[in-house]
Amino acid sequence: MELERLQDQLNEILVQLRFEQLQEVCLQAKTSTERQTKKHTLIRAINEAVDIAIEEEEEEVTYAFLVKLIKSAEEMEGRDVVKENTSKDAEALVSLQEQYTALQLSFQTSTKRLEEEMARLTHKMTSQGPSQGPSPKLAISSATQPPEVTIRREFKINGQIGERGQRDKLSYSNLVHQIEMGLKRNHGEAEIIEAVVRAISPGLSLRDMLEIKSDLTLAQLRTILKGHYKEDSSTDLYHRLINITQDSNESPQNFLFRAIELKERLLASSREPGTDEHYSTELVQRKFLRAVGTGLISDNVKYQIKGYLDDPTVTDDVLISKTNEAASFEAERQQKFRKSNRELKVREIRAETQPVSRGSNWCSWWTRTIILHINKDENSKNTINGDP
């Protein structure tokens, strides 16, 4: 019971952490973060490590392990608040410096243009002679806006592209994410393609082929990378999502994390140009919620989150939080029933093993045995009806 409470407390803190902080918690839990690009996949990995500790280690060891993870996560959450304030101050300072530089540039540009215009008009009036009348007053135009200056770094791929499945190499989803971020920051296709080629491990035939290929487009590069990583098509991902089910040794939370991961991969695959099938966000969300509802093993957990599964606008964070609450409630309920059944069985065994003499004691022995069996039947009926 105490371990489950600590696990629930840990999950509540993990949902609030950022991706980099979750990676640090994974290191504390001695869990690999390779090929993990989403928060929920890291949370699932941490939960799996906790489940393994609960099953294989003694209760005191598991308790210390959970307390250590909670303390580490709380410290990261506290540091994040301090860093956020410091980051805001730094951003404000950078903004003021940029404004100051822009004002200086604007002043210098405006002054130079005014001086050039004044010199031109003076020369024109001098060449025309005094008969042209009095010199008109020079109108000082308003300062023109400074030219926009954009400072942009060279686009680079963080990590190295190797063979599919290598632990220390980039995964396909991480690589696609970096390409999308480059496009959002207005990097050109040629620059992105060159960065991807440079990130491929030397000696791979993939790099040799791309280096000699002319007129390569970003859409063609995506198709080639998808084949190199042997990624599933959008149709395969769609069928995997609608047919997903919870494993017998899998918690409801980990099942939900696996379903969310499939959903995100399907959405990313559908957005790629040249994909075999395009699935809208609304359709994928409806199928995802239905797959979660039909794939859960526990009817009690399913019933408690049914209202959220019927809402197509529900977010993943809300669904994770409510599923965690429902799973904790169901685990507590089952533990109570198991404890009650164990106590009843012990009482029955003790009564039947007592020595019984002939005569009047024989009748009382049968009376006690019959009463115990009646109590057992009544408890069984209460369990079936859902009463504690």
Image (tube, rainbow, N blue to C red):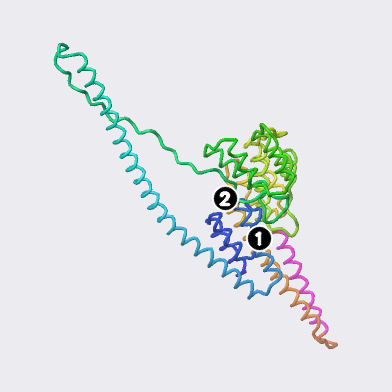
Which three-letter amino acid code belongs to the residue tagged 1?
Ser
Magenta residues, as a range? Answer: 362-384
In this rendering, would 154 be left or right of 302? left
Q: CA distance from mark 1 to mark 2?
A: 23 Å
Seen at 36% across and 50% down, the residue is 93
Q: Going 50% across and 62% down the picture, which residue do you hit? A: 76
Position of 67 with respect to 149 (left or right) is right
Residue 316 horizontal/vertical position (percent):
59, 48
Whether 244 is drawn above or below 69: the answer is above
Q: Position of residue 44 (x, y in %)?
A: 64, 57
Foreground disc of the pair 1, 2? 1
Instruction: Say what amino acid the circle numbered 2 marks.
Output: Asp
Tag shown at residue 32: 1
Q: Residue furthest right?
A: 358
Residue nearest the viewer, comparing 50 with 342:
50
Label 2: few (<14), some (14–19) or many (≥20) C-alpha neighbours in 10 Å: few
Q: Is residue 162 magenta?
A: no
In the picture, residue 282 is in which quadrant? top right
Quadrant for the C terminus, please: bottom right
Q: Which residue is mark 2?
A: 317
Image quarter hosting the N terminus: bottom right
In percent of width and height, residue 88 lies at 40, 51
User: Which mark sits nearer the N-terminus, 1 or 2?
Assistant: 1
- In terms of secondary structure, what is the magenta stretch mainly? helix
For image coordinates 73% across by 73% down, the residue present is 344
Return the mark for residue 384.
Answer: none
Residue 321 location, x and y as percent? 58, 54
